[in-house]
Amino acid sequence: MNSGKNISLQVKEFQQKARRVLKLRPALGKIGFSRETSIFPSRKGSLSVRVWGKKEIQDFKRLSSKERRKSLEKKLKNDISCIMLADGVSFLPEIEEVARKKRIALFFSGLSRKQCREETKRFFSNLCSDQITISGGLLQIFGLGVLIIGDSGIGKSECALELISRGHRFISDDVVNIMRLAEGKLIGTSSSLARYFMEIRGLGIINIKKIFGVRAICRQSELDLVISLKKWLQGKEYDRLGLKFPEDYKLLGEKIPRINIPVGPGRNMATLIEVACKVYILRQKGYLAAQEITRKLERALSLPCDKKRKIN
């Protein structure tokens, strides 16, 4: 569950996701869109989003222009990400001026002040209805959100680094925050503190964005597949055909397909993970190599001996 941690997303994403329900229209273009909107459970649901209406604008109009600027400098603190203006009123020039200076996004809302407040709280309530933090790494591989889990020291970060060098996108290392949205989707992201960073034994902390560029990183992703790295155990029987996936991985009441990959000397784990993702994509399209070869084998066994040689 939420566990008292802050839930956040960029103002750009907030505008995209809440645009219809809150009837939002930007007032200053994309100024402030890179900031993060948050809900702070420790403050009894306090929001970094502010909703103003006729009352707030009338209060400002009673002040002189100089007094408005002074009041706004105090009100618009760093923990405020955006302001929505409801009731069909307009922003005063001083509000736009200070918002530009502090890079705070301004929006017009087509709702009343009361409706806008209620819908905003409902929106964030749906966002943070379920959340969990787990140990693992998260990448986008061939468009799939892939959660890589396994025992400490098994090589998750080194494997992720190799995948990033091959052009796949990095989201989080070591710790992944996972949220369950109202529609049942699971979204994984990194904490704001550790975003873009990865720990590699022997190298220490590295910044993926600085090393590989902005195209190598992704802020969040829906979870599509779990790759579980397991130590190779001598004498243990492993699936040689791959007719079935292992049992689904359960997170926040949802099931995510999982593939177990044994880790052993000489195995190229990055390549195996890429192939596992391709196998999953093909399964989604209805193709399974093990079934094809089984059909060929059954067909070969059913034919006379002189015709078996003609089968490819």
Image (spheres, rainbow, N blue to C red):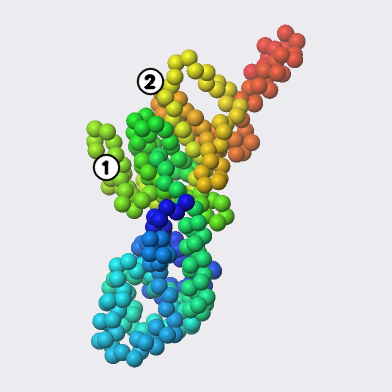
Q: Quadrant of the C terminus?
A: top right
Which residue matches tag 1? 206
Disc 2/disc 1 C-alpha distance (Å) = 26 Å
Q: Which class describes the residues within 10 Å of circle 1: few (<14), some (14-19), or many (20+)?
A: few
Q: Secondary structure at mark 2?
A: loop
Tally of marks: 2
Residue 67 drawn at (x, y percent):
26, 86
Tell me if label 2 and label 1 are in contact, CB under 8 Å. Answer: no
The correct choice, above or below, for 19 with respect to 94 in the image is: above
Residue lying furthest top: 305
Q: Amino acid at mark 2?
A: Pro
Residue 188 drawn at (x, y percent):
45, 48
Residue depicted at x 50% and y 56%: 129
Residue depicted at x 56% and y 51%: 184
Q: Secondary structure at mark 1?
A: strand
Which residue matches tag 2? 265
The correct choice, above or below, for 248 with respect to 172 in the image is: above
Q: Is residue 121 visible?
A: yes
Residue depicted at x 39% and y 88%: 58
Q: Which class describes the residues within 10 Å of circle 2: few (<14), some (14-19), or many (20+)?
A: few
The answer to which of 112 and 128 lies nearer the viewer is: 128
